[in-house]
Amino acid sequence: MRKNKITDLFTIDKPIIQAGMAWCSGWRLASEVSNAGGLGIIGGASMQPDVLKKHIQKCKKATNKPFAVNLPLLYKHVELHIDTIIEEKVPIVFTSAGNPKVFTTRLQEAGIKVVHVVSSVKFALKAEQAGVDAIVAEGFEAGGHNGREETTTLCLIPEVSQAVSIPVIAAGGIASGKSMLACLVLGADAVQIGSRFIMSEESSAHQNFKDYLLKVKEGDTKLSLKKLTPVRLLKNAFYKQVTNAEAQGASDEELRVLLGQGRAKQGMFEGELEEGELEVGQVAMSFHKIQPAQEIVQEIWTEYLQAIEKIR
Amino acid sequence: MRKNKITDLFTIDKPIIQAGMAWCSGWRLASEVSNAGGLGIIGGASMQPDVLKKHIQKCKKATNKPFAVNLPLLYKHVELHIDTIIEEKVPIVFTSAGNPKVFTTRLQEAGIKVVHVVSSVKFALKAEQAGVDAIVAEGFEAGGHNGREETTTLCLIPEVSQAVSIPVIAAGGIASGKSMLACLVLGADAVQIGSRFIMSEESSAHQNFKDYLLKVKEGDTKLSLKKLTPVRLLKNAFYKQVTNAEAQGASDEELRVLLGQGRAKQGMFEGELEEGELEVGQVAMSFHKIQPAQEIVQEIWTEYLQAIEKIR
């Protein structure tokens, strides 16, 4: 339970992957997670091409361990980002929100491992057919963008693991060594953890957002905006506006206007807690502290080993 | 991982509990599960008082092992049911949907163990304060009635287990030995499994319903009727009617009229697959066969022991 297909594929020590999160995970967080023996991921979605380049270069200086970049394939600068990733020889790319057929071969021909994020068995099979090296299977409880099937991690992982023969990384609802072991028991080879790393000292989330997450209780997040693209949000003033608009039958166009531009940046990066968009997973209800990223990795790892020991 | 607080409390061999399900679990199913070393539960909610009495009497003849009755506390015949349960010396009662303060003491004074079903830490603490012997913590992925917080089993179990000191039974999304071990790793002492036991030969679900469940895919169930009482349903014609009515802003009263009487019986017991109400969990996407209840218990148990072995 220490070494497996994922630690081999990425040449990392621990099958703990820090999710690439828009506005929350830059080079500081990614390099620290990689230095701790996990895999750190730079969240490319919230970066302009020149900004991503700088983050990759700084990450390479801050760690000599493998790290990755996360890239939603529908992102407007995706071509420029891919050029940068190849140029800078980033070893691993996590893609999401788009067709994995389009860029996988090009990235792999440049020697880059490609992992695609899915929320269903159907899309897991499509990603495997597209030739990706591994998949992330993400359940309903995850923060941010999510699938329409609403399948939870507990139901999703056993089915996806049986359906594909490439390695599976579980995501959604995982923030501890116990939930890590639970997901490996279900058939995953590794876990991807997002929300808990927002609570690291090195995450680029605004301090207001981190402090707010210390007070989150059960039921405080909700899968929202199901008419457009489902996304799990904290229930702040912005959430209430879009939810009311949806309830009153707003059209997709009206919702898009209401969403506007830069709401996620405003909320998570600039700390505007009511008017901004705050994306986080259900598991935020379990957070009690902000701590160094390396300490988070170590705590999860120690708890994971203890959980194994408890079964023995 | 074989004996624990729950096997001691109920004096059973295996911490596997078959959920009491309206229209699906009578004495035949409950007695077989108990005979296999788990705990079988008669679903009292769908029975008239005289029917429940007969089921209890037949169950006692069919097994000399402990069994239980499930009782939603808001049920109209609840007082009569409780009289019958005490009279017939049923050893264990699982209560749900109501205030556990009202009947717990009376049942316990009659020598009956009381377990209450909750969907949140908040209600878990209230049940503990009411003096129940154990709780079932049920996640979002479960079939039938469900909580408003939408917390999944993976997120719920670690928090509930930490919050209370009485034994915790995990429910929602569990149908295999792997998911059983995952939940015990998360902190549960036992698992309650519903949907998979619908697929037993002994369940009183209509054959049409069982056959339909063989074809369920991911995304085919949905937490519905959130305006009234949230319930996870299969997406049939009835589901579409109530969902459209909700989307068009139907009042609670209009929804109640549309729901009418006897929809659950019509769907699950009489096999009317389109006009009836079909309650099942997300995990139905993993079903491939109908088999004897004892074989289900044994299969889950064997897979559970193998999953432990794999970690060793």
Image: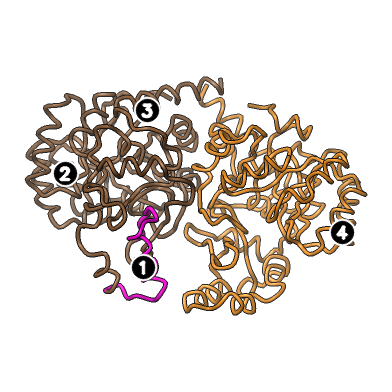
Chain colours: A brown, B orange
Residue at x 12% of width, y 39% of height: A110
> Dots 4 and 1: beta carbons under 8 Å?
no
Marks 4 and 1, how far apart at CA: 46 Å
**Chain assignment, label 3:** A
Which label belongs to residue B80? 4
Q: Are marks 3 and 1 on the same chain?
A: yes
Q: Amino acid at mark 4?
A: Leu
Q: From this viewpoint, is residue B221 visible?
A: no
Q: Secondary structure at mark 2?
A: helix
- Mark 2 is surrounded, within 10 Å at the Cα level, by few (under 14), some (14 to 19) or many (20 or more) other residues, namely many
For mark 1, what is the residue?
A227
Magenta stretch holds residue A237: yes
Q: Are marks 4 and 1 on the same chain?
A: no
Marks 4 and 3, how far apart at CA: 57 Å
Tell me where the magenta segment starts and ends, as one range.
A230-253
> Dots 3 and 2: beta carbons under 8 Å?
no
Which label sits in the foreground, 2 or 4? 4
Q: Amino acid at mark 2?
A: Leu
Toward which corner of the image does residue B300 lie, by quadrant? Answer: top right
Marks 3 and 2, how far apart at CA: 24 Å
**Chain assignment, label 2:** A
Q: Give how far across and how far down residue A294 sits, in percent.
A: 29, 25
